[in-house]
Amino acid sequence: SGVTKYSMGGDDTGDVFEITAATGLTTAPKFSISTSQVQPGTKFVYNKMSNFVLGDSTPSVSSGNNFRASGSTDIVDFDSGSTGQVIFVHCNFGATLSVVDSGTLNLAGGADFTCAAQFDNIMLIQLGINDWVEVSRVNT
């Protein structure tokens, strides 16, 4: 009760990699990759590094998928994301901010991610409106 289960794996009905918000794979995945396409769309400007605005606890992620985080303001949500969007938050030199497990940001084990070194980073995917899930993190 109160726990959302996510399934991830290869769907044998077309060799598609899927992430679904349910137990088991379904015909309505939140995110999928096949040999010919990535769903949903490709409207993001991939690999461009953008900077979050200092002091913004809900920065916009509409400009791409790679973001440099500076300062000390904790991030509790992201504005302007799209379902299926994958983002990387890279810690800038001297950053002390945290990405906070807030209910909207669902981090592994409920553990906040804190910038401790310049090359620390976290990767998240938006599975639905107000539903960001951690994929991986690096703390050096």
Image (cartoon, rainbow, N blue to C red):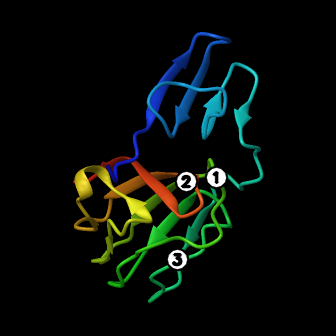
- The residue labelled by disc 3 is 52
Front-most of 100 and 121?
A: 100
Front-most of 134 and 3?
A: 3
Q: Secondary structure at mark 3?
A: loop
Q: Relative to 14, is 25 above or below?
A: below
Q: Relative to 82, is 38 above or below?
A: above
Left or right placement of residue 43 versus residue 85 in this view: right
Residue 63 position within the rendered picture, expressed as x and y whole percent measured from the top left = 68, 66
Q: CA distance from mark 1 to mark 3?
A: 20 Å
Which is closer to the viewer, label 1 or label 3?
1
- The residue labelled by disc 1 is 83
Precedes in sequence: disc 1 or disc 3: 3
Front-most of 92 and 125?
A: 125
Residue at figure coordinates x 28%, y 68% from the top left: 115
**Disc 1 crowd, CA 10 A, few/some/many (<14, 14-19, 20+):** some
- The residue labelled by disc 2 is 126
Q: Secondary structure at mark 2?
A: strand
Residue at figure coordinates x 50%, y 79% from the top left: 58
Task: Check the picture and name the quadrant holding the C terminus.
Answer: bottom left
- The disc labelled 1 sits on which kind of residue? Thr
Q: CA distance from mark 1 to mark 2?
A: 5 Å
Front-most of 104 and 91?
A: 104
Which is closer to the viewer, label 3 or label 2?
2
